[in-house]
Image: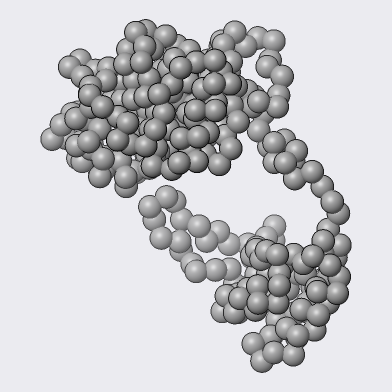
Amino acid sequence: MFELVLRCGQDQVETMSEALMALDALSVSVQDADAHTEQEQAIFGEPGMPAPAQGWLHSHVIALFADRALVEQAAGILQLQDFFVNASLERIAEVPDQDWVRLTQAQFEPVQITTDLWVVPSWHEAPAQARQVIRLDPGLAFGTGTHPTTRMCLRWIAHQLVKGCRVLDYGCGSGILAIGAVMCGAGEVDAVDIDADAVSAAQANALANQVQVHTGLPDKAQGLYGLVVANILAAPLKVLAPLLCGHIDQGGHLVLAGILSRQVEEIQQAYAPYIQLHVVDTQDGWVLMAA
């Protein structure tokens, strides 16, 4: 496999990317050409907020090709085009074969939730001090235990009396919260998601941890629950307020995550007709709200 790296301005990125795909590039990615310099600029806003800019002032457009002949042909054709003006060819280089699965897995290490409870990727050994272990293979679903929202939810579950409680994990992703609830003594646990890949990942992870979790699409959620937990994002959480609150049993708990500190008031307002939410945990700019 061979890599073609071009440098161009913000207004050229889209045209350059489309041209590369038309020239049989296997993939095209864009990076800040000024990264790690004084000119580096962040363009991605917080969740729910627009990006402060459409692109970087200078970008590296990186394309992968199957062989050298294709990459050299593409480079030659591009440099003849009118839209290539002020752009430059940075390099053509062979990309060494690597075990991409192993490289990806190496990003995820065991995560400590409490003194006893750990989340351990399926390809790692559990730490000696871990008394309870959630074995996890996220697959295509969100939820590895590394994100602050997931860790706060698991901490809440681990420190509450959920024994025998009927639990709904709404937007379950990998199923990590549902599995954690079972391990902490919950009774019947339903884990639902709009994403079929997430449902499959959650069921596979439950089986791998030898716990029983009922997985499915959102219509699988039926009746009342002693605990309803949803780790999504603020915008869908606001829309889901009546639905989620409608599933809470008398005296039950609602736990919400995926909320930034600046979004607390709007979430409280959205849920005010049904329940009074309070911030019960914070980490790295994210909050956990419960009622």
| 106 horizontally vs 230: left or right | right
Q: Quadrant of the rendered structure where residue 219 is?
A: top left
Residue 21: % across, % down: 65, 72
Residue ID at (25%, 45%): 239
Which residue is more in the foreground, 240 or 139? 139
Q: Would you say residue 255 is visible in this rendering?
A: no
Residue 13: % across, % down: 60, 74
Q: Would you say residue 80 is visible in this rendering?
A: yes
| 157 horizontally vs 271: left or right | right
Q: How many labels does the image show?
A: 0
Which residue is more in the foreground, 79 or 38? 79
Q: Where does the C terminus fall, quadrant-wise? A: top left
Above/below status of 161 relative to 286 = above
| 62 horizontally vs 148: left or right | right
Residue ID at (73%, 83%): 78
Residue ID at (75%, 45%): 100
Residue 64: % across, % down: 74, 64
Above/below status of 276 relative to 5 = above
Residue 148: % across, % down: 49, 32
Q: Quadrant of the rendered structure where residue 233 is?
A: top left
Residue ID at (55%, 41%): 140
